[in-house]
RNA sequence: GGCUGCGUGGCAGAGUGGUUAUGCAGCGGACUGCAACUCCGUAAACGCCGGUUCGAUUCCGACCGCAGCCUCCA
């Protein structure tokens, strides 16, 4: 029985879908003005695994991840670059998709864009005004009147008084209350703008998610996810907008993933301490990055360091080494495995405890190595198939062992490696250990590790 | 200042009121010409101080330390 930690109640709750057998999931995606960093990768991978596991549990999942393609930062960056907003956002949408694909992230069912949802956004703002939750000010902005919404603060665990006490933003004269937030921004000269009943302008950040989630999933859906930093104010404001406009609960389960940190500090653009997915993938293969992300529970902080990535790489190398010989049985379904499959399900059912699920896989690997040693081919092929089956949930073991262990090499390099191995084996046959070790040292210097197993020598990259 | 969350062995990271997490690294052994791989064995932990309890790393309270949100941020 799946339990999910709900940010609304701050507890694990048994998951019950609104509609039997179906899950409607919305995740806040990227603002596209720059490359994805590891923090973005974490959101993508975490909710990819959530989606995969829900599907593996028999649910028909509709997964929506939006794209914010109009906001202040985008306008600023486009101006800096001297390019159009459209060319900037198209470029970074493409870059984002490249990163997501590289990381093995399954594409969402739909990826709605703010700029393509203007009619719905404007309509929703009109509804909010009509219902008394919003007001247009003289300067052409439209604001949400926070005092009108009773539940304001229920997600982030604050109340309006506390927020006022902590207020440290310059007061905006156009607002009735400093806590009110903008739904529609009047256009300044030279800024991109859409026509609206309040004049030319563009939407505030929060309203797009309320409009798009309702359009794609309906007014009431199952799960809403995103990074922890969106809990306040973004998600709090979404609740105020959606529930104000629709008059019903909008989301049953809120899920927030923890931050990626560097030296115990949040990785973020403003701190400048981020690594892009692109640069990490130059050093580590995508599954190593996925494995690293999944070693920690999704709500815990994840500390990024070379050492952590190296550990993930070593661990994954051991899995692929175990998978090298047996031909994985192709029709294994982990659900049918009483022992390991049951433990895996228990771990994943417990709020997607991937760290615990990985420890089950480690036990499978050990069992696999044992049966391989005793030449129990049938059992080895079964356990290899079981690992691959678990891998479909976590997005691991999606390549052949050889492609992971050998990397991509041009033919001449492989020929050279193989000829050196042959030279060494000839020397070994002659018991010329000095020569044999000399050749092996040469290969080591090339980043090649040799493994002599049962009369044959295999190699892999370090 | 307000509000949240966290503090586990060398490192990473789950979990639990009394019994092995797991991975990486280490140590001993088997295998090997030597290694590597693999297997077997092994050691090592629960921030500090009180309380509840027969017993607490696990529950409660204080303290210390760290992080996050309160402003754009995944």
Image: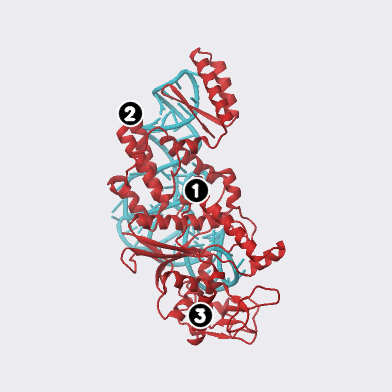
Query: Which is more toward the observer, A442 or B56?
Result: A442
Q: Name the residue tied to disc 1.
A: A292
Q: Chain of mark 1?
A: A
Give x and y (percent) for residue A11.
Answer: 39, 66
Q: Is residue A265 in sight in this rendering?
A: no
Give me the C-alpha separation between circle 2 and circle 1: 32 Å
In the shown orientation, is residue A368 left or right of residue A74?
Answer: left
Residue at figure coordinates x 32%, y 44% from the top left: A332
Q: Is residue A62 in sight in this rendering?
A: yes
Q: Secondary structure at mark 3?
A: helix
Q: Secondary structure at mark 2?
A: loop
- Mark 1 or 3: in front is 3
Q: Earlier in the sequence, mark 2 or mark 1?
A: 1
Give the color of chain A as drawn.
red
The quarter of the displayed image where residue A348 is located: bottom left
Give x and y (percent) for residue A284.
Answer: 55, 44
Give me the C-alpha separation between circle 2 and circle 3: 67 Å
In the shown orientation, is residue A443 left or right of residue A64?
Answer: right
Give me the C-alpha separation between circle 1 and circle 3: 43 Å
- What coloring was used for the rendering? by chain
Residues beneath discs 2 and 1 located on the same chain: yes
Residues beneath discs 2 and 3 located on the same chain: yes
Q: Secondary structure at mark 1?
A: helix
Query: What is the crowding at mark 1: few (fewer than 14 residues within 10 Å), some, or many (at least 20)?
Result: many
Give the color of chain B as drawn.
cyan
Residue A375 disc label? 2
Q: Name the residue tied to disc 3.
A: A123
Query: Which is more toward the observer, B51 or A290?
Result: A290
Contact (Cβ within 8 Å) of mark 1 with mark 3: no
The quarter of the displayed image where residue B71 is located: bottom right
Taking A451 as reference, is A311 above or below it?
A: below
- Mark 2 or 3: in front is 3
């Amino acid at each position: 029985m799946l339990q999910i930690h709900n940010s609304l109640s701050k507890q694990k709750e048994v998951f019950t879908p609104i509609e039997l057998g179906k899950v409607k999931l919305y995740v806040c995606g990227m603002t596209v003005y720059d490359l994805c960093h590891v923090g973005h990768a974490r959101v993508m991978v975490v909710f990819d695994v959530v989606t995969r596991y829900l599907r593996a549990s028999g649910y028909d999942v509709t997964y929506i991840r939006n794209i914010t393609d109009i906001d202040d930062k985008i306008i600023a960056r486009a101006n800096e670059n001297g390019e159009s907003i459209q060319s900037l956002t198209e470029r970074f949408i493409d870059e984002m998709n490249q990163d997501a694909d590289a990381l093995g992230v399954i594409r969402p069912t739909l990826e709605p864009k703010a700029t393509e949802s203007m009619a719905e956004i404007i309509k929703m703002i009109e509804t909010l005004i009509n219902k008394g939750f919003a007001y247009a000010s003289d300067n052409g902005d439209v604001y949400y009147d926070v005092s009108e919404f009773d539940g304001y603060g229920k997600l982030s665990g604050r109340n309006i008084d506390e927020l006022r006490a902590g207020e440290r933003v310059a007061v905006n004269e156009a607002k009735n209350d400093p806590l009110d937030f903008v739904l529609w921004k009047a256009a300044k000269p030279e800024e991109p703008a859409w026509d609206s009943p309040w004049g030319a302008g563009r939407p505030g950040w929060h309203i797009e998610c309320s409009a798009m989630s309702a359009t794609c999933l309906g007014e009431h859906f199952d799960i809403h996810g995103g990074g922890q930093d969106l809990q306040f104010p973004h998600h709090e404001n979404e609740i105020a907008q959606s529930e104000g406009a629709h008059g019903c609960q909008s989301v049953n389960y809120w899920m927030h993933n923890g931050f990626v940190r560097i030296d115990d500090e949040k990785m973020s653009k403003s701190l400048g301490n981020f690594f892009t997915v692109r640069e990490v993938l130059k050093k580590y293969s995508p599954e190593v990055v996925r494995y690293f992300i999944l070693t920690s529970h999704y709500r815990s902080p994840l500390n990024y360091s070379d050492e952590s990535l190296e550990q993930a790489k070593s661990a994954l190398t051991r899995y692929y080494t175990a998978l090298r010989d047996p031909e994985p049985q192709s029709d294994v379904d982990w659900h049918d495995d009483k022992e390991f499959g049951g433990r895996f399900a228990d771990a994943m059912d417990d709020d997607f405890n991937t760290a615990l699920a990985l420890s089950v896989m480690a036990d499978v690997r050990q069992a696999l190595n044992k049966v391989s040693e005793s030449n129990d081919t049938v059992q080895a092929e079964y356990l290899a198939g079981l690992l691959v089956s678990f891998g479909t949930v976590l997005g691991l073991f999606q390549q052949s062992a050889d492609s992971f262990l050998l990397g991509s090499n041009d033919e001449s390099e492989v020929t050279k490696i193989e000829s050196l191995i042959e030279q060494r084996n000839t020397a070994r046959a002659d018991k010329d250990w000095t020569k044999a070790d000399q050749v092996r040292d040469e290969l080591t210097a090339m980043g090649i590790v040799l493994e002599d197993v049962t009369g044959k020598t295999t190699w892999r990259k370090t």
